Image (cartoon, grey):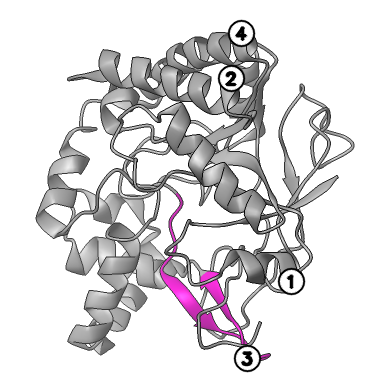
Amino acid sequence: MLQTWRWFGPDDPVSLDNVREAGAKGVVSALHHMNRGEVWSEGEVKKRRAEIEAAGLVWAVVESIAVGEEIKTRSGGFRERIDNHKQSIRNAARAGVKTFCYNFMAITDWTRTSLNWPLAGGGTALRFDALDYAAYDLFILEREGAEADHPPERIAPARARFEQMTPDEIDGLERTLIDWLPAREFTYDRQSFKRALALYKEVEVEDLRANLVAFAREITEVAEEEGARLAIHPDDPAFPIFGLPRVMSTAEDVRRLFAAPSPLAGSRSAPARSARTPRTTSSPWRTNSPSESISPICATSGANRTARSSRPTISTARPTWSASSPR
């Protein structure tokens, strides 16, 4: 087992020295400056790998080469984007990085309502608060049809939460939900996010699943040729948000994907990132759970922590530390 840590590149406030001091031996990273669907050159991968190795670490996993909305919806220039993705896998594998994590979450990627929720010990954690999300979806974004997607008993409390928010709190929540993620192709404001949601108006769950299977078949063939392994990040959170379809939320979703392409396509869980619990990569031949042996995978394991609060929450995995917090 190799202990690894998610590192967002040279702009990450957590430096490679910090990663090494925390006890990790490698990093999970990407070329975040090349995340608009272009081809990763072998030279750029070697340059980043050399930077990581100069810090006494190894680049263990690529997370992620961007999978844009054109690929997920099989629209526009999806053919060029898929071909670029395949070439990026080839180039990175030939440069010595052999494990690739990707996801097929429509638009949002993994989603939280807070990136710096304070913990009792002085650190901060990522957090998904159901009421904050409902308040944004219903009363800030004002998404068409949103009311039908939230439990009736949550709507009134969500309205009360919204009415208590200051303009700065509304802006911060919006930026966290739709305008932040290092590996995203681009960021959104409210209107462009609504336009992006409209791309999925006619995309049903089975349409998205078929597009995932078609994409996975293609990139798995390349991975097999290059002696590389693939891992797919499950939907996070593992239920629909913003009215978007989800196809990697349940055990049945995983089984249906693994029944389609090569057994080299695997799944990945997202553990905590903290000073005391660096991300770790487990054996590529088993899942986190001994009872769930599905196929050869690149899985990860680690301890998740929960931020305690009186507010209702759903999942508070993957703690992280701000630059001012103790590590």
Give whichever of discs 2 and 3 has the lower sequence position: 3
- Type of residue at label 4? Glu
Q: Are the residues flagged by discs 3 and 1 in contact, CB closer than 8 Å?
A: no
Q: Is residue 28 left or right of residue 245?
A: right
According to the picture, the residue beneath numbered tag 2 turns out to be 257
Task: Give the residue displayed 57% in from the left and 87% down from the top.
Answer: 325
Q: Is residue 83 left or right of residue 96?
A: left
**Range of the magenta residues?**
110-126
Q: Quadrant of the C terminus?
A: bottom right
Mark 1 burial class by Cα count in 10 Å: few <14, some 14-19, many 20+ = few
- Per the image, is 64 magenta? no
Mark carried by residue 21: 1
* Distance Cα–Cα, label 3 vs label 1: 19 Å
Q: Quadrant of residue 315?
A: bottom right
Q: Element type at marker 1?
A: helix
From this viewpoint, is residue 290 visible? Answer: yes
Camera-near label (1 vs 4) is 1
Q: Are the residues flagged by discs 1 and 2 in contact, CB closer than 8 Å?
A: no
Give whichever of discs 2 and 4 has the lower sequence position: 4
Camera-near label (2 vs 3) is 3
Give whichever of discs 3 and 1 has the lower sequence position: 1
- Type of residue at label 1? Glu
* Distance Cα–Cα, label 2 vs label 3: 41 Å
Judge by depth and name the residue closer to the eye, 111 or 201: 111
According to the picture, the residue beneath numbered tag 4 turns out to be 225
Residue 287 in the image, given as x and y percentages of width and height: 79, 35
Q: Quadrant of residue 310?
A: bottom right
Give whichever of discs 1 and 2 has the lower sequence position: 1
